[in-house]
Image (tube, rainbow, N blue to C red):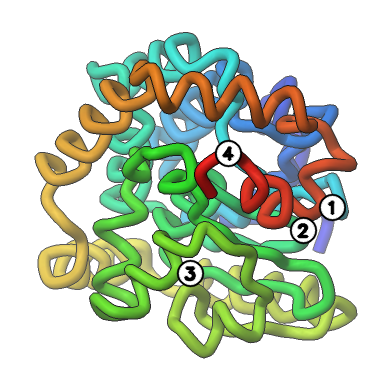
Amino acid sequence: MPVETDFPSYETLAVQKEGAVLFLGVRNPPMNLLGPELVRDLVSLIQRAEADESIQVLVFKSEDPDYFIPHVDLTQVEEYRAEAARLVGEPSIALLFHHLSSSRLVTIAQIEGRVRGAGSEFVLACDMRFAARESAIFSQFEPAFGLLPGGGATQHLVRLMGRARALEVMLSASDYDAEFAERYGWINRALPADEIDAFVGALAHRIARFPGSGQAAVKDRVNAIALAPAEDFRRDSDIFGAGVHDAETQWLIRTAFERGLQTRDSEMDLAQMIGTLPGN
């Protein structure tokens, strides 16, 4: 199918429009952290796509083979939260992600590389998640820093996995591979890396061929059953926002930075690094 080029490009998102489907490659070097630039572009992209009736499906990928979105940029918490307010009226990526889940747009995450913290919460906000067996790594590590996940992980994971498994995932702050994530319900399915592109592309185009009214009606009713109210996301966001300023949390974050937090090499095995922090 010919690629259309009438959709704008963004600093941190590579855009490819194919009919009613937008394929979006996350490209925010050096390691695709969720910072103000990426949140700004996500806000603009969502606004533009929702206003364009010809767009029905968004597929999010990564242009970095090692990192999808590893987590937020912990040096710019206030800045990325402020960017989220441009869409949802409040400085909260939890409400931004809730907005994405509530949108008429069908969203699919094609996960290759590491997706942790708010990166995990972003893909959880998407309607469907497919991961490469060979490379996808998942983690919800905020409790290692004394924090509640602030972008909706608690709301999603408990509903997807059940109470005990959600507690295991969050309280362990460990890394989990795609086959584990599939077994626990974190994702729809794990696929071989050499098949995931074709599978996700075919699925996206198949969905886009059907009436948008049906997609919106189904999402509305499914969300009424399975998506937590915005107020619950707001509460988690507020708890995270307050907790990140706690003295012990700040000390643990500083210590982690000294050991390589937010550097590509150290975060290849983040679970090992945070497991050696004082008190862990």
Residue 278's mark?
Answer: 4
Closer to us: 206 or 242: 242
- Indicate which disc, 4 or 2, sits on the residue closer to the N terminus: 2
Which one is in front in this view, the residue at disc 1 or the one at disc 3? 1
Between the C-alphas of marks 1 and 2, the distance is 4 Å
| Residue 124 visible from this viewpoint | yes
- Indicate which disc, 1 or 2, sits on the residue closer to the N terminus: 1
Q: Residues within 10 Å of mark 1 (few under 14, many from 20)?
A: many
| In contact (CB < 8 Å): disc 1 and disc 2 | yes
Q: Amino acid at mark 2?
A: Gly
Task: Name which residue lies at 83% across and 46% down.
Answer: 63
Between the C-alphas of marks 1 and 3, the distance is 21 Å
Between the C-alphas of marks 4 and 2, the distance is 28 Å
| In contact (CB < 8 Å): disc 3 and disc 2 | no
Q: Position of residue 280 (x, y in %)?
A: 54, 49
| In contact (CB < 8 Å): disc 4 and disc 1 | no
Left or right: residue 127 versus residue 214 is right
- Indicate which disc, 3 or 4, sits on the residue closer to the N terminus: 3
Task: Name which residue lies at 40% across and 54% down.
Answer: 125
Task: Name which residue lies at 77% across and 44% down.
Answer: 267
Which one is in front in this view, the residue at disc 3 or the one at disc 2? 2
- Indicate which disc, 4 or 1, sits on the residue closer to the N terminus: 1
Between the C-alphas of marks 3 and 2, the distance is 17 Å
Q: Which residue is mark 1?
A: 66
Q: Which residue is mark 2?
A: 113
Q: Residues within 10 Å of mark 2 (few under 14, many from 20)?
A: many
Q: Amino acid at mark 4?
A: Pro
Q: Amino acid at mark 1?
A: Asp
Q: Position of residue 225 (x, y in %)?
A: 12, 71
Q: Which residue is mark 3?
A: 128
| Residue 54 visible from this viewpoint | no
